[in-house]
Amino acid sequence: MSEQTGEKTPERKSNARVIGWCLSGVVGMFAFGFALVPLYEVFCEITGINGKTGGRYEASATQQVDENRTVTVQFLASNGPGMTWKFRPVVRSVQVHPGESVTINYYAENPTDQPMVGQAVPSLAPSEGTLFFHKTECFCFNQQPLEAGESVEMPLIFIVDRDLPEHITKLTLSYTLYDQGKQVEVSKSDRAQTTTNNNG
């Protein structure tokens, strides 16, 4: 009996080692999965891959406008899963000169009987144009609270860079609106304190 027990000990040690490696691998993959999302976000923002647009842009006071060139900018809107708001651009497209500051609005309405918070996430096509599309002001920088039945027009101010490649003549900016949950009623003065999540 003692010989059999002795023979099994190395086997048990080997099994324990394999289980340890497997558990370490699972923990490592789990941690990598969490780290991958923010790393991917940073990578997309730097490279413009996946149509992710950058954050707030500080326009130069000496910004030059290229009046010899016109670019069409189209605007789209959609709701994320479970989002019940009415959400649309006020205008569907505009013609802009690279370098000029342009303001348009998106309309949002909360048709429910509960206060809610929405968050818009932008995407630009073609993705090659993301490095040349600059938002100086955007409702997507902040979460948007709306009371039950309330509606709002939300401004977007942007500049198409003069360095936009010549072969790009049309840009399509899409926003997807996501439900950030219900909240207690908030006064309009409190909305200045709305949380920024830098989703740009």
Image (cartoon, rainbow, N blue to C red):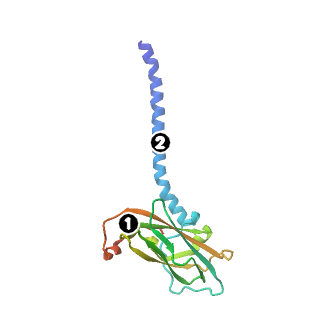
Q: Nearer the viewer, mark 2 or mark 1?
A: 1
Q: Please indicate whether residue 60 sits to the left or right of residue 187 in the image.
A: right
Q: Is residue 25 above or below residue 52?
A: above
Residue under the image location 51 percent in, 80 percent down: 104
Question: Quadrant of residue 173 in the image?
Answer: bottom right
Q: Amino acid at mark 1?
A: Met
- In terms of secondary structure, where does tag 2 sit? helix
What residue is shown with label 1? 116
Q: Residues within 10 Å of mark 2 (few under 14, many from 20)?
A: few
- In terms of secondary structure, where does tag 1 sit? strand
* Along the line of sight, the residue nearer the viewer: 175 or 50: 175
Q: Amino acid at mark 2?
A: Val
Q: What mark, if any, has residue 41 been given in the picture? A: none
Estimate the x, y position of residue 10 in percent, counting from the top left. 46, 24
* Along the line of sight, the residue nearer the viewer: 132 or 156: 156
Question: Quadrant of residue 109 in the image?
Answer: bottom left
Q: Is residue 81 above or below residue 107?
A: above
Residue under the image location 51 percent in, 62 percent down: 42
Q: Please indicate whether residue 50 sits to the left or right of residue 136 in the image.
A: right
What residue is shown with label 2? 26
Q: Is residue 42 above or below residue 16?
A: below
Residue 189 seen in render: yes
Q: Which comes sooner in the sequence, label 2 or label 1?
A: 2
Residues at discs 2 and 1 in contact (Cβ within 8 Å): no
